[in-house]
Image (cartoon, grey):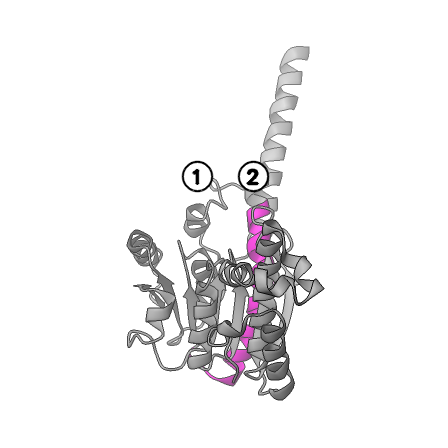
Amino acid sequence: MKNITKQNSKKTESEDVSLSTLNNDKHEIRPGQSHELLKELHILTRDGKLNQDSRRKLKQVYHLYQFIEPLLEEIKRDHVDIQLVDHGAGKSYLGFILYDLFFKMLNDQSHIYGIETREELVKKSQELAQRLDFPGMSFLNLSVAASTESDLLPERIDMVTALHACNTATDDAIAFALKKQAKHMVLVPCCQAEVASVLKKNKGKSLAKDALTEIWRHPIHTREFGSQVTNVLRCLQLEAHGYQVSVTELVGWEHSMKNELIIATYKDLPRKRPTERLQEVLSTLGLEEMQQRFFAG
């Protein structure tokens, strides 16, 4: 009897833990979210549960969403039918999360466009959107640069996102957003080699002129400094086009060293000073040949 009671006690305790876990999961997952989508994103396990790793992923998703949601709300107050383009979409995780948490409740012509060069990922995203019944999502097999001229996208775009778009793809996304006069940009830049390659090329003649060149004399410093300067130039470029820019860190993205978050909102701000600063930085660092890349308004 004593052993049976002990076993029953363990069973009851196990059931209580299981129920507790399920209840906690319900509180951690926002109401109305698609569990099938969360399984596709590997945030929920196959049996619909959250484990320690998936809780971390969910926290990361919500952390990024908290930056984007107020921007979407601002657009919605201004006009209906939000048009969002996600560049370098990959498996379109961000687009699907935004649609699931925000767009599917709008009941209007709002739309998310995922731009991706890998055809197999575009097809998978199309199939998933159809399976989830997310009609306001489209996926285009285009480069960021090609999408700027594509008639498959509307003339007016309200928000542009680009998460971990490698090297110059982030700059192409900025150029796209500027041409489309996007109200908001949300950018998490990735591997950035172009500026570093120009710094390296001009290093020899710069060393004799300026002691500051020591900052990027060694190859590892050239790479890291080039990455830092790239984002500085991007911010100045956006400000030179009248955008208000904030830069922060995506806390919690432990799986990526590239976690700098740039958020730009068009405010029609004065352009003269950031334009002058942009030109001065390019000149000081011997990057004059990159003026076409980091063009001012």
Amino acid type at image mark 2:
Asn
Cα distance in 3D space between marks 1 and 2:
11 Å
Amino acid type at image mark 1:
Arg
Q: Name the residue under label 1.
A: 46
Quadrant in the rendering for residue 93: bottom left
Q: Position of residue 218 (x, y in %)?
A: 62, 51
- Residue farthest along the right direction in this orientation: 211
Question: Nearer the N terminus, badge 1 or badge 2?
Answer: 1
Is disc 2 placed on a helix, strand or loop?
A: loop
Q: Residue 224 carries which label?
A: none
- Number of residues whose C-alpha sits closer than 10 Å to that of mark 2, classed few (under 14), some (14–19) or many (20 or more): some
Q: Position of residue 180 (x, y in %)?
A: 42, 80
Main SS class of the magenta portion in the image = helix
Q: Which residue is drawn at 33% across and 75% down?
A: 153
Q: Residue at x 63, y 78 (%)?
A: 280
- Depth check: 116 or 83 in front? 116
Q: Residue at x 56, y 50 (%)?
A: 58
- Number of residues whose C-alpha sits closer than 10 Å to that of mark 1, classed few (under 14), some (14–19) or many (20 or more): few
Asked if residue 1 shows in the view, the reply is no
Left or right, residue 192 beside residue 218: left
72 within the magenta span: yes
Left or right, residue 37 beside residue 5: left
- Depth check: 14 or 1 in front? 14
Q: Position of residue 214 (x, y in %)?
A: 68, 58
Left or right, residue 33 beside residue 153: right
61 within the magenta span: yes
On screen, residue 196 above or below 106: above
Label 1–label 2 contact, CB within 8 A: no
On screen, residue 255 above or below 169: above
Q: Residue 51 carries which label?
A: 2
What segment carries the magenta color? 56-81
